[in-house]
Amino acid sequence: MTLTTYARRLLRWEADVPLMDDQRTALIAAARDAFQPLGPVEASFDEQGDSLTLRLRHARFPALVQRRMALWLCAQTLIETASIALAQAGTMLIGSELPSDADWSACVQPLREISDWWNEVSPIPGPQARRHRTQLQTIVKRRQYNTLGGYVSRELRVAPEPGLACYAFVPLVIEAIWSQHADLSLHALCAGLNLDEMTRRPREALLAWLNVLPSTLRRSPSAATAAPIDRVIAGIQADCSLPYSQQNLSRSLGLTPAYFCRLFLEKTGQHFSTFLTRTRMEKAQSLLSDGREHSLAEVSLACGYPNKSYFCQVFKKYTGLTPGEYEQRSK
């Protein structure tokens, strides 16, 4: 059976820190799973092994607005999987659509970070989207979940193009929920969202989803205090040599990995892996420039890297220099 291709699109996921071989293998598998609802994906890493290029064939959803919303959901799925399951932060970049028969080399336009891309292509313009986001966040914060559908329904009645606006409300609602319920995964939130039905009757499918969301939200605890994250930050800053991991820390705090990840990002403005790497690299720079003799193994272990080779990879990516070069320049 010949697969219909509506368009092609180039995507890229760039790791904040160097990846290990097993992480690369897992990330390729995660990318294929994440974008499977849209169509087949070819995945390959660059020579350094830290940038994953994805060549996506849009084989579902004939309308551009449908593909864009579905792409936002799929990209968020990959971000969530990478940050939680793989404990890796990264940047998701989105390219423009190419005609179905176009060659990949025709993609010369720069790729945009997912938030910038969605702000540009969303059917609801920026100022209106910000107003809706604020209103939706207030509804969720007050736990008035049953009014979500009513609010969206009223706004659709006055929207210039209500059919298109339906596709913009899906990300708006999800982001509003995450601001108060960071523990909820994208999979849990989208359990009642029928993408195929949205292609036929977008308003009805959207409101049906909003009608089942309250039961999911009521099972979720209220927004947690940031106090546990403060303790994690203090612990890392006091001794970054320990083998910290999102899985172990979230378990020790009684939080799900998804909840821990989003709470940490909300508190610090950084993903956990990014914060941990920055703290360790600052420690390494301090040791290499303190004027005392330290072996590479000593510095590596003091910064939480038992593997000297991997420590050197991370250090060079972070500073642009090898540890030896940095030490020489600091003298």
Image (cartoon, helix red, strand yellow):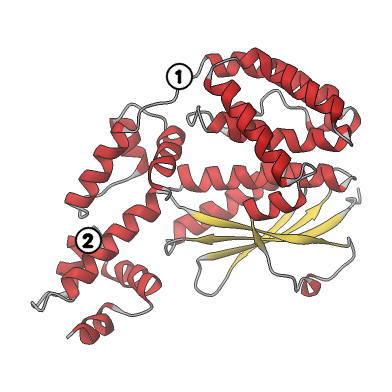
Identify the image quadrant of residue 124. Answer: top right
Local packing at callout 1 (Cα closer than 10 Å; few below 14, some 14-19, many 20+) is few
Residue highlighted by disc 1: 221
Image quarter in which the C terminus is found: bottom left
Seen in the image, is 251 located left or right of residue 55? left
Q: Secondary structure at mark 2?
A: loop
**Residue 292 at x, y percent in the picture:** 8, 77
Whichever of labels 1 and 2 marks the residue nearer the N terminus, that label is 1
Q: Is residue 322 above or below residue 278?
A: below
Callout 2: few (<14), some (14-19), or many (20+) C-alpha neighbours within 10 Å? many
Left or right, residue 20 beside residue 192: left
Where's residue 53, x and y in %?
64, 64
Q: Depth-wise, is mark 1 or mark 2 nearer the camera? A: 1
Would you name the residue on which mark 2 appears? 303
Choose between 189 and 305: the one closer to the eye: 189
Using the rendered image of the protein, determine whether residue 99 is visible from the camera's viewpoint.
yes
Mark on residue 95?
none
Q: Is residue 85 visible?
A: no
Residue at position x 77%, y 47% in the image:
68
**Residue beneath the point at 44% across and 33% down:** 259
Q: CA distance from mark 1 to mark 2?
A: 36 Å
Q: Secondary structure at mark 1?
A: loop
- Residue at the spot x=44%, y=41% of the render? 266
Q: Nearer the viewer, residue 78 or 33?
A: 78
Compared to 291, does 127 lie above or below? above
Rendering coords of residue 229 (x, y %): 31, 37
Under mark 1, the amino acid is Pro
